[in-house]
Image (cartoon, helix red, strand yellow):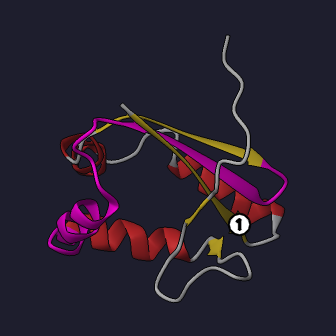
Amino acid sequence: MQRFILFLDLRDDPKLIEEYEKHHESIPSEIKESILSSGIETMNIFRFENRMCLEIVASDGFSFEIKDKMDANNPVVQVWESFMSTYQKIIPGTPEGVKWVLAKNIFSLTK
């Protein structure tokens, strides 16, 4: 099992943020299927103001490279991602060609 935390900003506009959240109340079934078929088992998006945090729990066989290739070959995902980009704003320092930036785990505590 793998866990990833990623960050992305939304455009700092309350109306756009509200619209973005509404679009995620019921995502298209093709988008849900593309997520689950890549090995992602759970996905949660959290928001504070215009900053979003994405938590992914995935199988050991999951990789972002494979998911990216799957998405590139899925026209429904391409339309969805393009549409969602109208609401999103890249965090400064994010590498070129990347939207969600992967967080570095700097501390863990387990019993």
Q: Nearer the viewer, residue 16 or 107?
A: 107
**Residue 23 relative to residue 14: left or right:** left
Instruction: Identify the amino acid type marked 1.
Output: Asp
Q: Quadrant of the C terminus?
A: top right
**Residue 88 relative to residue 92: left or right:** left
Circle 1 crowding by C-alpha within 10 Å: few under 14, some 14–19, many from 20: many
Count numbered badges in the picture: 1
In which image quadrant can residue 67 be found? bottom left
Residue at image x 63%, y 79%?
Answer: 94
Residue at image x 43%, y 40%?
Answer: 26
Taking the view exactly as shown, the residue that stands out farthest to the top is 111
In which image quadrant can residue 61 be found? top left
Q: Is residue 91 magenta?
A: no
Instruction: Give x and y (percent) for residue 106.
Output: 72, 48
- Magenta residues span 48-75
Taking the view exactly as shown, the residue that stands out farthest to the left is 73
**Residue 50 relative to residue 5: left or right:** right
Secondary element under disc 1, as helix, strand or loop, is strand
Residue at image x 72%, y 59%?
Answer: 17
Where does label 1 land, which residue? 9
In which image quadrant can residue 75 be found? bottom left
Instruction: Give x and y (percent) for residue 32.
Output: 30, 43
Q: Is residue 70 magenta?
A: yes
Please tell me whether residue 41 is drawn above or below residue 6 in the rendered image. Answer: above
Q: Quadrant of the N terminus?
A: top left
Instruction: Give x and y (percent) for residue 48.
Output: 81, 48
Instruction: Give x and y (percent) for residue 53.
Output: 66, 49
Residue at image x 32%, y 48%?
Answer: 28
